[in-house]
Image: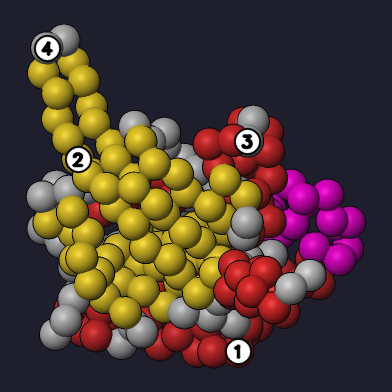
Amino acid sequence: MNKTAMNANNQASENVLRASGVAKTYAEGNLRTEVLSDVSFTLRRGETMAIVGASGSGKSTLLHIIGGLDSLSAGEVEVDGRVLSKLSDAERGRVRNRSLGFIYQFHHLLPEFTALENVCMPLLIRGTAIAEAQREAGVLLERVGLGARGHHKPSELSGGERQRCAVARALVTKPACVLGDEPTGNLDEANAAQVYALMLELNREIGTSFILVTHDTRLAARMDRTLVLHNGVLRENAA
């Protein structure tokens, strides 16, 4: 392999996620609404990125597309070297399980299961043995300050504890990238600050990349990069 090809391969391996010319248009009858237009960016391993913009600007739509949860109208998204549009539904599911973690504004923990069982779920879906999954989940719960709360159900946890549990669940598989959609939008200021600090600390320790959609300018300022979505166009924030 020549040097140019080696450099190209090394650069590609450093990029955990790439969006190229992504567009999304919703059509209903004769009405067409363009939500995203020619969105392109790359995310490097270990990098943190905030996506900000007004309500209704398409931030969540973009996050769902790059997470393989929604289809695009044009362009392509590549996660860990796999182009999502070229994969079957089952293959996309495996990419999400192995390469991505998700954190939402509302924790989406399964109410009938304990904190430990909720954090185990991504590992069990992957096929990890129960004992190993419980061990890995226990380590993450300890790390997010919930080691003594593993056998409590979500209804027995505070809002901040539920969201920290959701962070542990997103990171238990050691994904290449975590996608967060307003991950602290439902928390008070003190709990939000705690969860922010936790995510950034785990980013440094584990090396997982983060893309966070947020209205919180303080959180955005702590990310490595901030991109602004306006009228369907994504641009780097020069501020």
Residue 32 placement, left or right of 2: left
Residue identifier under label 1 = 205
Q: Earlier in the sequence, mark 2 or mark 3?
A: 2
Question: What is the quadrant of residue 107 in the picture?
Answer: bottom left
**Image: magenta residue range:** 116-133
Residue pictured at 36% horizontal, 74% vertical: 49
State the residue in front, 99 or 195: 99
Residues at discs 4 and 2 in contact (Cβ within 8 Å): no
Mark positioned earlier in the residue sequence (2 or 1): 2
Decide which of 138, 61 is in the foreground and name it. 61
On screen, residue 137 versus residue 20, left or right, reads right
Residue on which the image places disc 3 = 87
x 62%, y 50%: residue: 82
User: Does the magenta-highlighted stretch encompass residue 121?
Assistant: yes
Q: In the rendering, which numbered label is found on residue 37?
A: none
Residue 56 inside the magenta-drawn segment: no
Q: Residue at x 67, y 69 (%)?
A: 5
Quadrant containing the N terminus is: bottom right
Q: Which residue is mark 4?
A: 30
Spatial CA distance of label 4 from label 1 is 51 Å
Give the residue type that dot 1 points to. Answer: Glu
Q: Residues within 10 Å of mark 3 (few under 14, many from 20)?
A: few
Pointers 4 and 1 in contact (C-beta within 8 Å): no
